[in-house]
Image: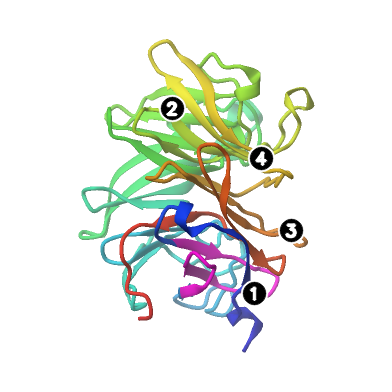
Amino acid sequence: MDDKDALPAIRVNVCEEQAMQPGSTLVNFCNHGIGAPITIAVLDAHGNIVWSHRRYSPKQMWGQTANAPDLRGDIDARTTERGVLIGGTNIVEGIARVHAALVSWEGEVLWECPVVNHHHIHQTPGGTYMFLVDDRRAFSKFRGTTLVGDQIVEWDPKTNAMVWNWHLFDHHEPESDRSDYSHANTIEPDPRDNGLIISCRNMNQLVKLDRTTGDIVWRLGVGGDFAMDAADYFYHQHSPELQPNGNILLFDNGTGRPEAHGGEFSRALELKVDERDMKAEAVWSYRHDPDLFCPIWSDADRQPNGNTLITFGTRTPGETTRYVEVTSAGEVVWDLELQPSGWGTYRAERVLRDIPIGV
C-alpha cells in the first residue's frame, strides 16, 4: 500500500458506550507529511473505521498530479439525506484545488461545486449550499496593502448559480493591516431572526449579520459590542453552535490569550448571550486535564443527551488529535486518539441517522 493510501490507527482511551450519545462519528483525516489526499471517514464507538472516502482533484493543474495531497486539512464534512457533503479545499498556491462535493454513501459524486471554498459548507433547509470564499481587497488607508477577508456564498445546485452573496469588507472597515484579516471558519444560521453568525478567527470575534439588509447586527468577543468578563473572552475560536435557548457553544482555541487571562489554553465554552442588554457570560466550559492546546483547529458539538463532543484537532508532528465526549458535569465518557502523530482532524460530527455501512 502506498503511504498516501494509509489510514491512521485509532487508540481507545475511554469508551463508556452506555453513557455516550448513540451514533457514528464523521471525521476528516489529514496527513500532509505522507501526501494523503482529502479523506473522510466514519467511526464506530470503538474507533473502527467503518466507511471512508477520498476526494481527488478532477484534473491536473500547475503541473501537479490529479491526486493532490491535502496540505491544509480544513475540511468540513456533513451528512445529508443523500450522502456526505464535503467542503473545503487546498488553497495552497501550486496545488490543485479540490472542489466541494456531495458524495453518496456508494462513493458517487452527485454534485460538485465550481467555486473554490474554504473551511465550511452546509446545506440549507431549501436545498441550497452556503459556504465561505476568500475576498481580497487593497485598502488605501494601509498604503494600498491587500488584505484577505471573507465572503459568504449561497449556491443553488439545481441552477448551478449563486443566489445570494455577502462580503465582510462591504460592512466592516478593517481595523488593522493584518494580511489574513478575518480568517472566517464557520457560518451558523440563527433561525430566530434570519440572521447568520460567522466565526472570524483572526478577529477573535463572532459577527452576526442581518441576512435581509446585510448589516452587521453585533460583534461578540474581544473589542466587540457586548459587556463581558475578560476571563470569558475567546481567542482564535472555531465552530460556534447556537443552542435552542440562545446560548452559543464554541471551541475557544486560546491562541494569543494574554497571560493576565490565563495564557494559551484551549477549552469548549458556552456563552449566554443577551442581545437586549448586550451582555455575555460563560455558563459552562470544559478544559481537559492535562491541557490539550490546539492553536488552529477543533470543534465542540452539544449532543441530544446533553453531552458535548469535542474535537481537539491538530496537524502538528509530535502531537495527536483527540475526540473527547464529556457529560455536562465534565466526566469523560469517550476518548479516541489518532496514531501516529501527524494525523489530524479539523472537525467531527456525531451522526444520528442510520447510514449504509459497508457499501
Q: Determine whether the residue tagged by mark 3 lies in a helix, strand or loop.
A: loop
Image location (x, y in percent) of residue 89: 51, 61
Q: Which is nearer the eye, 278 or 137?
A: 278
- From mark 3 to mark 1, how far is it between C-alphas? 18 Å
The residue beneath circle 4 is 266
Q: Does 166 appear above or below 8?
A: above
Considering only order in the chain, which callout, 2 or 3, is on the residue closer to the N terminus?
2
- From mark 1 to mark 4, how far is it between C-alphas? 28 Å
Q: Which is nearer the eye, 317 or 158?
A: 317
Image location (x, y in percent) of residue 334: 56, 55
**Residue 187 visible in the picture:** yes
The residue beneath circle 3 is 319
Q: What is the crowding at mark 2: few (fewer than 14 residues within 10 Å), some, or many (at least 20)?
A: few
- From mark 3 to mark 2, how far is it between C-alphas? 39 Å
Tag in front: 4 or 2? 4
On residue 108, the disc is none
- From mark 2 to mark 1, how far is it between C-alphas? 39 Å
Residue found at x 64% / y 74%: 35
Q: Determine whether the residue tagged by mark 4 lies in a helix, strand or loop.
A: loop
Residue found at x 23% / y 53%: 127
Q: Residue furthest bottom?
A: 1
Q: Does 53 appear above or below 347?
A: below
Tell me: 56 left or right of 314: left
Q: What is the crowding at mark 3: few (fewer than 14 residues within 10 Å), some, or many (at least 20)?
A: some
Q: Amino acid at mark 4?
A: Ser
The residue beneath circle 2 is 171
Image location (x, y in percent) of residue 301: 46, 45
On residue 35, the disc is 1
The magenta stretch is 25-50
Q: Amino acid at mark 3?
A: Glu
Q: What is the crowding at mark 1: few (fewer than 14 residues within 10 Å), some, or many (at least 20)?
A: some
Tell me: 194 left or right of 21: left
